Amino acid sequence: MAWKTSAKIKSSKRTKRDMWVGFKPYGIGETKPNHYKEMLKTLWENRDNLPYAWRILHKGVCDGCALGVAGFHDWTLSGVHLCTTRLNLLRTNTMGPLDHALLADVAPLKTLRNRELRDLGRLAHPMVRRAGEPGFTQVSWGEALDLIADRIRATTPDRLAVYLTARGITNETYYVAQKFTRFVGSNNIDNAARVCHAPSTTTLKRTIGVAATTCSYTDVINSDLVVLFGANVANGQPVFMKYLYLARKRGAKVAVVNPLREPGLDRYWVPSNVESAMFGTQMTDEWFAVNTGGDLAFLNGVLKVLLADGAVDRDFVRDHTEGFDDVVVELDRESFDDLERQSGATRADMERFARMYASARSAVLIWSMGITQHERGADNVAAIVNLGLARGNVGRPGAGLMPIRGHSGVQGGAEMGAYATALPGGLDVNAANAAALSEHYGFAVGDRPGITAEEMVEAAGRGEIDVLYSSGGNFLEVLPEPDVVDAALARVPLRVHQDVVLSTQMFTEPGQVVVLLPAATRYEKRNGGTETTTERRIAYSPEIEGPRPGEVRSEWEIFVELARRVAPERAEQCTFASGQEIRDEIARVVPVYSGVELLRTTGDAIQWGGTRLCEGGTFPTPDGRARFLAVAPSEVDVPPGSFVLSTRRGKQFNTMVHEQKDPLTGAMRDALFMAASDIEGLGLRDGDRVVVRSDHGEMRARLHESPLRPGNVQAFFPEGNVLLRAGRRDPASGVPDYNAVVTVEAAR
Ligand code: SF4
């Protein structure tokens, strides 16, 4: 069970000169992360608590992205697994409490950014602020919980909403939070997966019957072809670059479909590999520049070429799928002229991709936010699944569909049922599944889906939410149109913000009262906890000995205590005495998680579903067959002189910005990424200050010349959120659209 006994891939000692960038030890002089400087910075930042910091790194499961590592080792490769994202997040776990006297007046705190608030220290005591008061007053846990419980009792379940973030939260917390929410009669619970991979969850369920990555990382390394669609793993999942490096060394091709030729995917220095660290590695063989939102048209064009070339795996399609004929009819309706215009790619590009794909014996198709955070996110995912099914690239070695996850909690959050549209096990919210869960729980579970993350804020804005309970996260920075979000939050009579540090949303004016609850980090949680990685591995992270700031509590314990105060007469229906008890119940309620109750120590893990899902082309759908979905591209109306803007990440972890300068691109936080020809067309120069306007807002920015497909621009998230329109989202999955049509002009 432990990583020590897993078969791991060793790095080949043979060098491969054709992959070298050139002799540049550690990429000196290049625009790239300086891993050694980051290590020294981490040492310095954590100097007051180094033994604890070391124990977290040595024993904990990383609370950064969902690639997954326990201590310094993962379950895929021999050698060390560590990245700067993990190091950057470490201080949040080791710092002491903030000076709570600062909270007595929030006015100065409102001028601080999230990063500055975080640096003040850990939230360590329950605090309350009522409307009209300048700031927060410290209260006891009992007072805080009684206040919340009274309000929950006084309202109706439909006017309660619970939201959880995705960083650091354990499966145990998600599980108890959703059970608590259903215990008080509501299905209004959602998590951060809603604003990232909800389209993947929705479409994978519809097409292949299971909302998870179908393969393992070993399949990536052993594949013939790895394709990244709208995913910048150099930034989001840095150690994945090591997997790609090994894949390339073993002969795989790596292709990228993206509006911007990301420098980190172009060439990379893997710090723990001598050859790569010395000579750098050309990571990508083939680039395909598409428009923002042009992926669907590009993918349909590729499928059209495969059909014309007779390169579709007809046996697989016939024996294991449904719906292909509808796709053919749809593709017949689409002309290459239209597909070229919609995708931004040429027909020759589509043919080049199709022939590369057809000649690969196996392929892993990987995608992320560039695909999902669109009004048509679910359809974009469907087009990728169609491509995978067309050549049977599911359920066999070296092949798979991988919605790569950027946060350690997002895969498990939905599988634990902390999701408006899913019960534990990722089951649909319907009468039969609700009845079965009611049997387990001994209380009635609602059989209608709850409201999703953005819907919660919209309902708040209409005055339809009385209690908004947010565990981590920051709606003000995550959702489009921050001023609309702020106004909506200010209407909620009771807001609860349960967190390890301060965030800007805590200082939105109280509707009536705001309660802050100090949460324990992943490593402080009593009896440890588990995380589910992108490759479905449930990994155990133990409770780690160290200082505990003030009165912090494990989040699952807070929900248990709250249940006891809301309904003491039936509190035993929602009570747990330990993390172990929660895992025991998860194993009973979510059969695919069976074995989670046996995890005890660092390195312990089980991979639900085994190495591969859908093995042999047998899909977990009612008839065992996968579904093709016919999806038609749509036109984005871009007036002449306007651009399509998408939001992107820099040196940050979701809304937690670590550095003003992105080491991978060299861009500052106010950058507007733009193609050289577009800059020239505007009569401007690289570095010029500009005003970017959409029909919903404007931001001041500085031009950052980039290898971007002309007609498209990019701004950092969350700074660019002022340009986005609230309420525009993918109807199938509820993910907000993080794109906008904008104009750009010189700033005066
Ligand atoms: S790649 Fe992801 S899981 Fe691995 S150390 Fe970095 S943040 Fe953690």
Image (cartoon, rainbow, N blue to C red):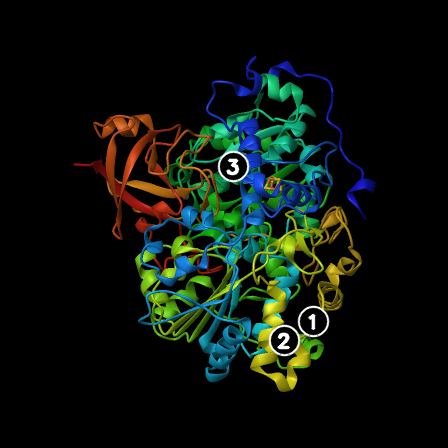
Q: Which mark is residue 321?
A: none
> Which quadrant: the C terminus?
top left
The residue under label 1 is 576
Task: Find out whether the residues at labels 2 and 3 contact each other: C-beta distance under 8 Å.
Answer: no
Against 602, residue 175 (above or below) is below
Residue that carries the numbered disc 2 in the rendered image:
434
Compare marks 1 and 2 and give the one earlier in the sequence.
2
Nearest the viewer among 13 and 326 is 13
Q: Tell me which numbered mark, 2 or 3, is placed earlier along the sequence.
A: 3
Front: mark 2 or 3: 3
The extreme bottom residue here reads: 569
SS state under label 1: loop
Q: Residue at x 70, y 58 (%)?
A: 620
What's the residue type where badge 1 is placed? Answer: Phe
- Real-space Cα distance between discs 3 and 1? 38 Å
C-alpha gap between disc 1 and disc 2: 21 Å
Residue picked out by circle 3: 235
Secondary structure state at the residue bearing disc 3: helix
Between the residue at mark 2 and the residue at mark 3, the CA separation in whole angstroms equals 40 Å
User: Where is residue 208 shown, x and y percent of the image?
Assistant: 64, 54
Q: Residue furthest right?
A: 5
Residue 438 in view (yes/no) = no
Is mark 3 in CB contact (under 8 Å) with mark 1? no
Q: Quadrant of ligand 1?
A: top right
Comparing labels 1 and 2, the label whose residue is closer to the camera:
1
User: Percent position (x, y) of residue 682?
Assistant: 22, 30
Q: How busy is the neighbourhood of tag 3: few (under 14 within 10 Å), some, or many (20 plus)? A: many
Q: How many marks?
A: 3
Image quadrant where residue 310 sits: top right
Q: Tell me the residue at 66%/63% (across/down).
A: 425
The residue type indicated by label 2 comes to Ala
User: Element type at marker 2?
Assistant: helix
